[in-house]
Amino acid sequence: MRDPLSLTLISSAGERDCSFRPNRLFIAGWTARDRAAMQAHIEELAELGVTPPSKTPLFYRVAASRVTTAETIQVSGEESSGETEYLIANIDGELWVGLGSDHTDREVEAYSITVSKQMCDKPIGSSFWPLAEVAAHWDRLIIRSHAQIDGEVQLYQEGSLSALLPPQDLLQRLSREEAPGFQPGDLLMGGTLPALGGVRPATRLTVSMEDPVLGRSLSHSYSIETLPLVG
């Protein structure tokens, strides 16, 4: 078991530090509200050999020990990539929103999405906002990612959270499928947007979330260190 994560909780009342030990990690897949957009993402992954989902949305369980705020992760081989996602955390019974990257081994994903998600660490930002402070204007929040590919930083994903199912919807569905529901220590990644130009590896990824109503933003950057495949 990893050491607790050091988080910063940022609200209208100020900031405070928090020690948080993840208990369970759920990654929601196929969460687009726009069915055409979701089909585009399914087709995007199908080009990589990924089998279409049995239902939408799906909740994948990943070891909570995979969650990290580190600035570098290590992966095996050249076939992994990240994607920005909003993140909901149950911290001492209160819901907080942050962001992370569902870094995934795409080669493994071709034969098992569940296994592929377990292959890589899941980088998350260390700063969170109270969900209650953004719930009323949730659809106006914007998430982005910038990828460093071949030495060049490129806009990799961008869009508002109106494109994805909102957290309360996902949490209600999750509670029906996973007893005893979303508990203190639990984390939920809420899905992603299609990659501009298609899914591809990068050497560094920056994920961000912008709140244009309250004029604030969250971000997290991490580098990807590729380990050789031998044997």
Image (tube, rainbow, N blue to C red):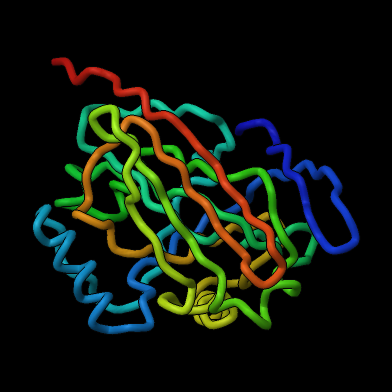
Residue at 38 percent of width and 38 percent of height: 120
Q: Which of 27 and 192 is in front in this view?
A: 192
The quadrant where residue 80 appears: top left
Q: Is residue 69 above or below residue 130?
A: above
Where's the N terminus, which quadrant?
A: top right
* Coordinates of residue 40 in the picture (x, y in percent): 20, 71
Q: In this view, does 83 lie above or below 7?
A: below
Q: In this view, does 159 lie above or below 187?
A: below
In-image side of 137 versus 221 (left or right): right
In-image side of 163 versus 26 (left or right): left
Q: Which of 127 and 146 is in front in this view?
A: 146
Residue at 59 percent of width and 37 percent of height: 69
In-image side of 172 versus 127 (left or right): left
Where's the C terminus, which quadrant?
A: top left
* Coordinates of residue 148 in the picture (x, y in percent): 33, 35
Residue at 51 percent of width and 77 percent of height: 170
Residue at 19 percent of width and 54 percent of height: 198
* Coordinates of residue 220 in the picture (x, y in percent): 55, 42
Kindly give the residue lying farthest to the right in the view shown.
Answer: 13
Q: In this view, does 90 lie above or below 111?
A: below
The quadrant where residue 21 appears: top right
In-image side of 37 versus 231 (left or right): right
* Coordinates of residue 138 in the picture (x, y in percent): 60, 77
Q: How many marks?
A: 0
